[in-house]
Image: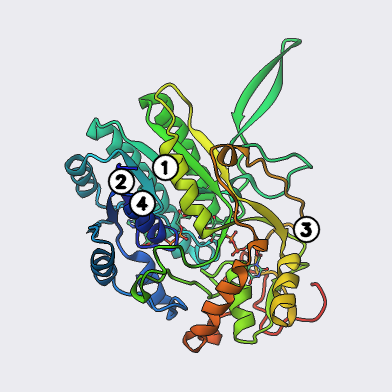
Amino acid sequence: MKKKILIMGGDGFCGWPTSLGLSNDGCDVTIVDNLSRRKIDIDLECDSLTPIESITKRLQVWKDISGKKISYYNIDIACEYQKLLDLIITISPDVIIHFAEQRSAPYSMKNSNLKRYTVNNNTNATHNVLCSIVESGLDIHLVHLGTMGVYGYGTADLKIPEGYLNVQVDVEGELKNLDILYPANPGSIYHMTKTTDALMFAYYNKNDNVRITDLHQGIVWGTNTVETKMAPELVNRFDYDGDYGTVLNRFLMQAAIEHPLTVYGTGKQTRAFIHINDTVNCIRLAITNAPDHSERVQIYNQMTETHTLINLANIVAKLTGAEIRYYHNPRKEDTENTLMVQNDSLISLGLEPITLENGLLSEVYDIAKKYQSRCDEEKIICKSLWNREYKVDLKGSEKPV
Ligand code: NAD
Ligand code: USQ
């Protein structure tokens, strides 16, 4: 693949391995990132479990090892529209991949300032990207990282379709078929911004024929890919704290430092998962299978398996001998749900899913063990509450709560 690719948010957890992977494929990659994720670490007095280098060092080491240059621009795409537009016109990319949003649900619920920051950042970032594509007059395929959380997780036993729901409406006695965007049902301010993104995509696609692929991704687990393993300085970030750490990586890190696994509520919530290697592979597939101008927004469910949280905890406990504890759920979410998801599109395009059974859980556990001395145990318990009546639970209990 030899495309010119602009990666918004290319310094982040999903963006960094994607940038290296596409560069290794032969693409001409440029990263745009305002490093806000690194600044949030400073504000939260927390850090990636893995020691990540500065973006300059990362890119220099990549050039030394691979002989390939990735350019980098520090632009806040939510605020610096003219800089973004000028860069797009200068580079004239074939594809823009948009990762650049505030992506933590707990962080987005911490207080009014962070709710407002998440809404302003995410909706303006997405709108500025769309607006600049149109103003540039260039024919650019936009690939966006969306979330399974736009659908909500309760499915009334319906297999969640890939973005669109076929409904029958009664028009004066005559039944007509309609394809509508699956009803949005966000569970946090962060997830709400992703449902707003989806409407903006539908509009710009309808009005300006922008070619868009929206990848509704599940929870990403894992750390490294082929490229991030090429040198210690290229290691990917590993979030473990109560705001940014996601559940499976958190369980594996907790096991590594002999902290009880923090299952919220009953543990019967079901969620969708995907390994970081598959994230990169799905993006490759999205790029090589771009929609044409007459097509509606292409929506793929980017996930490979579903699990209840207690099932995940049991798998990790079996692998590592960790203790499982139940904590009062800091989130307002269903105590239990089933989740069935259609994910045929990416598989039919060639995705070969990596699942928990592929043995990669131990790799993540080993990384967590290696860097356990960098863990600040004070940061493990989630202190972001969805609702004023909720309380932080520091101890947990042996039984579901
Ligand atoms: P991340 O926070 O690690 O990366 C996001 C990057 O975007 C960061 O480097 C940040 O500095 C940058 N950024 C944010 N706002 C910006 C702005 N206004 N201008 C320029 N750069 C900005 O997050 P991630 O885990 O890599 O997630 C990337 C995308 O994938 C997000 O949109 C997220 O919603 C989606 N996603 C992530 C997961 C997951 O489990 N990590 C799952 C589903 C979907
Ligand atoms: N949970 C626990 N214990 C923990 C952490 C989380 O039981 O220690 C539970 C939560 O209550 C929730 C589930 O695990 O039910 C998932 O939480 P998470 O933090 O792993 O994931 P989530 O907040 O949903 O967000 C993550 C990414 C987000 C992405 C989303 C995909 O941070 O960017 O959009 O996964 S999805 O979940 O499919 O919407």
- Residue at horizontal 55%, vertical 83%? 369
Between the C-alphas of marks 3 and 2, the distance is 41 Å
Task: Give the amino acid type for the residue marked by disc 2 in the picture.
Answer: Ile
Callout 3 secondary element: loop
CB under 8 Å between discs 4 and 1: no
Q: Taking 111 as reference, is 71 left or right?
A: left
The residue to which callout 3 is attached is: 336
The residue to which callout 2 is attached is: 5
Quarter-of-image position of residue 135: top left
Q: Quadrant of the C terminus?
A: bottom right
User: Of circles 2 and 4, which is in front?
Assistant: 4
Which numbered dot is residue 292?
Answer: none
Q: How is the image coloured?
A: rainbow
- Residue at horizontal 20%, vertical 49%? 83
**Spot occupied by residue 262 in the image (x, y as percentages of width and height):** 68, 76
Task: Give the amino acid type for the residue marked by disc 1 in the picture.
Answer: Val
Which numbered dot is residue 143?
Answer: 1
CB under 8 Å between discs 2 and 4: yes
> Observer-nearest residue: 24 or 19?
24
Between the C-alphas of marks 1 and 2, the distance is 10 Å
Which numbered dot is residue 22?
Answer: 4
- Residue at horizontal 58%, vertical 37%? 348
Between the C-alphas of marks 2 and 4, the distance is 8 Å
Task: Give the amino acid type for the residue marked by disc 4 in the picture.
Answer: Leu
Callout 1 secondary element: strand
User: Of circles 4 and 3, which is in front?
Assistant: 4
